[in-house]
Amino acid sequence: MQEPAFAAYSILRYGFIALPLLMGLDKFFNVMTDWPGYLASWIADLSPMSPQVTMYVVGVVEIIAAVAMVIKPRYASYVVAAWLALIIIDLLTFSGYYDVALRDFGLLLAALALARLASVFDPAWSSATKR
């Protein structure tokens, strides 16, 4: 029987591997939704690329976040939380997606909880290299 804290850590870690990986891959296929439609116009105006190509870049970042979560969740969970904060800013400045922004705020809190759990169950780089 797993300790409850370790079980929570595992659930969150695997969830934050699967979620960014699937969302990142879908940025290239637009199966779940039309991703460029979620890009605030001010961000699209700042980007030198088309909205679809900008979403390809977003997809690559999300895939990298998933890989980082496999390698080092102690640090990657803070990266995921920051990425979710940026997504929330995009959604709050793009009227009509407040429900999705609220959901992403919940995910941000879960990523921060994972970071705290990972501080116990995933050794720091310095500790890992001393072994």
Image (cartoon, rainbow, N blue to C red):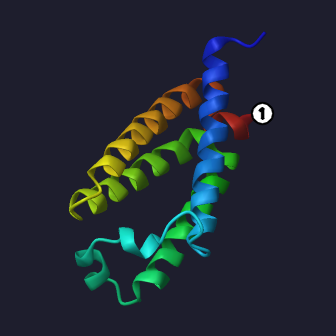
Looking at the figure, which quarter contains the C terminus? top right
State the image coordinates of residue 125 (x, y, percent, origin top left). 63, 41
- Which quadrant would the N terminus be assigned to in this image? top right
Q: In this figure, which residue is indicated by the disc labeled 1?
A: 131
Left or right relative to 104: residue 77: right
x and y percentages locating residue 60 in the rendered image: 58, 70
**Residue at screen point 28% across, 75% down:** 43
The quarter holding residue 66 reads: bottom right
Q: How many marks on residues? A: 1
Quadrant hosting residue 95: bottom left
Label 1: state its secondary structure.
loop
| Relative image position of residue 36 (x, y in whole percent) | 42, 75
| Residue 129 or residue 42, whichever sits in front | 42
Left or right relative to 109: residue 119: right
Query: Which of these two is toward me, 26 or 76?
Result: 26
Horizontal arrangement in the rendering, residue 84 relative to residue 114 (left or right): left
Q: Quadrant of residue 65?
A: bottom right
Of residue 75 and residue 3, the one placed in the foreground of this image is 3
| Viewer can see residue 125 | no
Q: Assess disc 1: are there few (<14), some (14-19) or many (≥20) residues with their C-alpha within 10 Å of its C-alpha.
A: few
Query: Would you place residue 48 above or below residue 69 in this image?
Result: below
Judge whether residue 13 can be spotted in this image. Answer: yes
Q: Amino acid at mark 1?
A: Arg
The residue located at (35%, 71%) in the rendering is: 39
Across and down, in percent, residue 31 comes to 60, 68
51, above or below 62, in the image? below
Relative to 45, say whether 68 is above or below. above
What residue is drawn where x is 39% and y is 37%?
A: 106
Which residue: 59% across, 23% down?
120
Q: Is residue 83 above or below residue 74?
A: below
